[in-house]
Amino acid sequence: MSIENNTYQPDWQPQNAGSEFACFVTKGVDDTGGPTAANVQPVRRNLSVDEYARGILNGDRAILSRAITLIESNAPKHFATAQELIQKLLPHTGRSMRVGITGVPGAGKSTFIEALGSWLCDHGHRVAVLAVDPSSTVTKGSVLGDKTRMEKLSRNSNAFVRPSPSGGTLGGVTRKSRETLLLVEAAGYDVVLVETVGVGQSETTVRNMVDYFLMVALTGAGDDLQGIKKGIMEIADSILVNKADGDNKIKALSARADFDMMLHYLRPATEGWVSRAYTCSSLTGEGIPEMWSVVEEFFKTVRGNGVFEKRRKEQVLKWVNDMAQEHLENLIGANQAIASAKARIEEEVTAGKLPPTQAAQEIIDVMERELFHGGR
């Protein structure tokens, strides 16, 4: 018995059943080509390398995003396509101002980047932000909240914000970040801001990617320095004390003076440049134009004394060596014979049967045999 035209009682339900059998079946769609089929989205087709390159050079942000996803993919089938794309775009790269930004958690790096990026867009620049989020060491997942925090900048037609999970890699910046940087340069972004996950000795990885390195700090320099290694200050071209507004402004000026004094006794991070400390307020915008003037003065200096070109060449060579080392580590990690021998040797070491020095030599011997002598 049907209660509506499109429903009916199932066969197993007793006839004239009462309310205790409150079950009805809705009829399906007879015509598979009906209106529901029209709402099905077609599968997105794969683009050729030429289509990727053409879209990127024309500033198509959708294609740029797809290309970065291709670069970030760990699938072997995507690697060859990604490398061919980079090769095709290489002549169109290298023209941007690469700025790395790090700082203690809570220093307001993302807020500062949005304020700076918005100001730059308003003054004729095209800005790309590569914001690397820390990945969970347990789930490998990432919140990717930077694009949410940079909502205003994300909507700007002259900006491109790309949050990427760090994947737990050293410093939060992967090898693929360098390739992503090349893609956004080819797309015409003349300022690239690379935000790192925080402060740590591994931030030297970022130093090898960018031209200018900025450390964002908070007031109360004495407390902040407990979480900052001396090595980070040594590679910073400038230190920026953020949140210099309201009642906090006097503290910010005091912190700037403290940082200035510390930088005075450190060797400059870049030849021919004197590292200094500055203040700004990402909330009010005060100090943002002045900070960018410092960046422009930096580029004028390093281009004039030859340091810019020298550093770029050194970074390319560092990139090559890093990739070669990564490939070797992948070969070692994928070799079952090495993994088995390593597990056995580690057990012997922890059991006190084998001294560490001899254990290391045995692992090296296994690696040489498996990788360079065909397992013989």
Image (tube, rainbow, N blue to C red):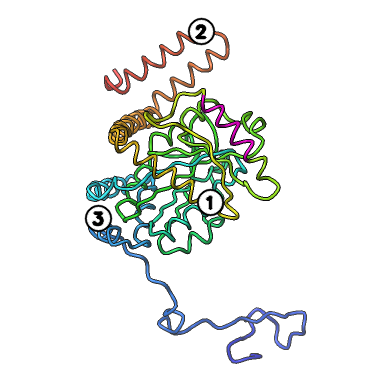
* Residue 31 image offset from top left, x and y in percent: 43, 84
**Quarter location, residue 324:** top left
Alpha-carbon neighbours of circle 1 within 10 Å: few (<14), some, or many (≥20)?
some
Q: Mark 2 or mark 3, which has the lower sequence index?
A: 3
Which type of secondary structure does the marked residue at label 2 adopt? Answer: loop
What count of labels does the image hold? 3
Amino acid type, mark 2: Pro
Amino acid type, mark 1: Leu
Amino acid type, mark 3: Val
Taking 249 as reference, is 265 above or below it? above
Q: Mark 2 or mark 1, which has the lower sequence index?
A: 1
Taking 214 as reference, is 235 above or below it? above
Give residue 355's mark.
2
Q: As rendered, which of 125 and 151 lies closer to the eye?
A: 125
Q: Mark 3 or mark 1, which has the lower sequence index?
A: 3
Residue shown at the point (45%, 47%) measured from the top left:
292
| Front of the two marks 2 and 3 | 3
Give residue 144's mark.
1
Q: Main secondary structure of the magenta part?
A: helix
* Residue 188 image offset from top left, x and y in percent: 31, 55
- Label 3 and label 1: CA atoms lie apart by 28 Å
**Quarter location, residue 368:** top left
Q: Specify whether residue 153 is in view.
A: yes
- Label 2 and label 3: CA atoms lie apart by 53 Å
Residue bounds of the magenta highlight: 253-264
Taking 358 as reference, is 311 above or below it? below
Residue linked to disc 3: 49
